[in-house]
Image: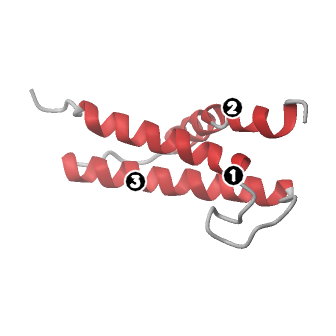
């Protein structure tokens, strides 16, 4: 059957999204490799979250392209992807801001 996406592709992109969504909240380095900032400002964390979302979306686009024809990106896809990415970032947000230190 054509049109079915192999399970490894979906699993890879979702695991990458889960890790990337939580990275800004669990470390104090800028973009994971940069200089250590203690404490890292919230604006940096949000910028990192946006950059990670774009990188994972590009990974998903590359995987989709390697499996066949890519579908056109419309605003609905971008809105849903950002909501999914923010949902995946919730555990890191809770760990950083809502737990008692």
Q: Label 1, on which residue?
A: 24
Indicate the quadrant where residue 14 lies. top left
Residue 60, position in %: x, y? 38, 48
Q: Identify the residue at the far left of this view.
A: 1
What distance separates the C-alpha of mark 1 from that of mark 3? 18 Å
Q: Could you classify mark 1 by the number of other residues whose Cα lies within 10 Å: few (under 14), some (14-19), or many (20 or more)?
A: many
- Rendering colour mode: secondary structure
Q: Label 2, on which residue?
A: 91
What distance separates the C-alpha of mark 1 from that of mark 2? 11 Å
Question: Is 21 placed left or right of 62 in the picture?
Answer: right
* First along the sequence among labels 1 and 3: 1
Position of the N terminus, as image quadrant, is top left
SS label for mark 3: helix
Tag on residue 59? 3
Residue 96, position in %: x, y? 80, 40
Looking at the image, which is closer to me, 58 or 92? 92
Mark 3 vs mark 2: in front: 2
Q: Identify the residue at the far right of this view.
A: 101
C-beta proximity under 8 Å, tags 1 and 3: no
Mark 1 vs mark 3: in front: 1
Looking at the image, which is closer to me, 31 or 5? 31
Residue 66, position in %: x, y? 22, 52
């Amino acid at each position: 059957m054509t049109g079915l996406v192999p399970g490894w592709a979906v699993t890879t992109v979702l695991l990458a999204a889960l890790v990337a969504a939580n990275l800004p909240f669990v470390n104090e380095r800028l973009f994971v490799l940069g200089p250590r900032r203690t404490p890292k400002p919230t604006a940096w964390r949000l910028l990192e979250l946006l950059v990670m979302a774009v990188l994972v979306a590009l990974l998903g686009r590359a995987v989709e392209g390697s499996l066949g024809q890519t579908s056109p990106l419309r605003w609905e896809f971008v809105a849903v992807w950002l909501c999914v990415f923010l949902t995946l970032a919730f555990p890191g947000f809770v760990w950083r801001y809502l737990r008692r230190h």
